[in-house]
Amino acid sequence: MGRTIPNVLSIAGVDPSGGAGLLADIKTFSALGAYGCGVVAALTAQNTRSVDAVHVPPVDFLRQQIDTLFADVAIDAVKLGMLSDAASVRTVAERLAHFAAPRVVCDPVMIAKSGDHLMSAEAVSMVREALLPQSFMLTPNLPEAGVLLRQRAPDSLREMYRAAEQLRDLLPLDSERWVLLKGGHLPGSELTDLLFDGDRMVEMSSTRIDTRNTHGTGCTLSSAVAALLPRHLGGFRPVENAVRQARDYLVAAIAASGRLTVGHGHGPVHHCHALGRD
């Protein structure tokens, strides 16, 4: 790589409350020692309780943002978040392919914590057709896995195993690609995620923290993985260790979320928890 501080790009929507999307991604990159770049794929009128409106910039401007950035900055990893329509998905996929973008972590943001749907059916089809072939890792939660697989969401660990295998089949089979299936929607005091590369299934578990401050947890985990992947290159089991470190970071950010007072719904995690206490 040649850089001690990796340049990591988020292509995502903007959540004005700062708990999810592009703002959360940039905070996560910075907290984990990466330099964060951002391309705005959507604007939302959003808070901790609801998503009231979404504005999608013209695809020509989306393309220009990406092209201008890649023309100047060497990007070491990419995190993909909210891409709400098919034209945006297609444009991002085309530009990532054009620039041979490395280590693309695709977080298919489809349903907000409030339950609001953020992606059209046509856009979901375009994700399967155009975006997943460009992705190094896919990081859906259980409802998103159900949407991608066009079936009901997994409701047990056993069904998660089968879904992870099916999701891996949506990625190119002739190269190293990964699925991180997040199990936070299952009930119980223990939370288990599955990491699968088509050969080895790794269970990663942690104790669930009793809090309402879970807004943007999916965004934060995927952006943490993107920030950490370049740092683990050449190490032992680099992808697995990057994901484990990302999960540890998220658990600590959730545990520290009570230090924040943001909104009246699902509050954000404390992305910068390790930078000092007020």
Image (spheres, helix red, strand yellow):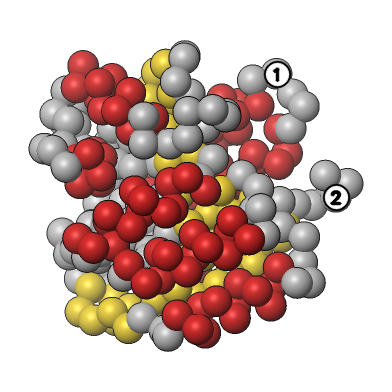
Q: Which residue is drawn at 64% across and 53% down?
A: 101
- The residue identified by callout 2 is 3
Q: Which residue is drawn at 65% across and 26% down?
A: 238
Residue nearest the observer in this picture, 17 or 235: 235
Q: Quadrant of residue 261?
A: bottom left
The mark found on residue 134 in the picture is none
Q: In this view, does 138 lie above or below 263?
A: above
As measured in the structure, the alpha-carbon distance from the residue carrying label 1 to the one carrying label 2 is 20 Å
Residue nearest the observer in this picture, 20 or 41: 41
Residue nearest the observer in this picture, 6 or 272: 6
Q: First in sequence: mark 1 or mark 2?
A: 2
Q: In this view, does 14 lie above or below 152?
A: below
Q: Which residue is drawn at 51% across and 78% down?
A: 62
Q: Residue at x 50, y 84 (%)?
A: 60
Residue nearest the observer in this picture, 128 or 194: 128
Point out the image quarter for the N terminus: top right
Q: Position of residue 188 (x, y in %)?
A: 18, 26
Point out the image quarter for the C terminus: bottom right
* Identity, as a three-letter code, of the amino acid under mark 1: Phe
Q: Position of residue 105 (x, y in %)?
A: 51, 47
Q: Is residue 109 above or below residue 154?
A: below
Q: Position of residue 37 (x, y in %)?
A: 64, 67
- The residue identified by callout 1 is 236
One can see residue 8 in this view: no
Q: In which quarter of the image is residue 86?
A: bottom left
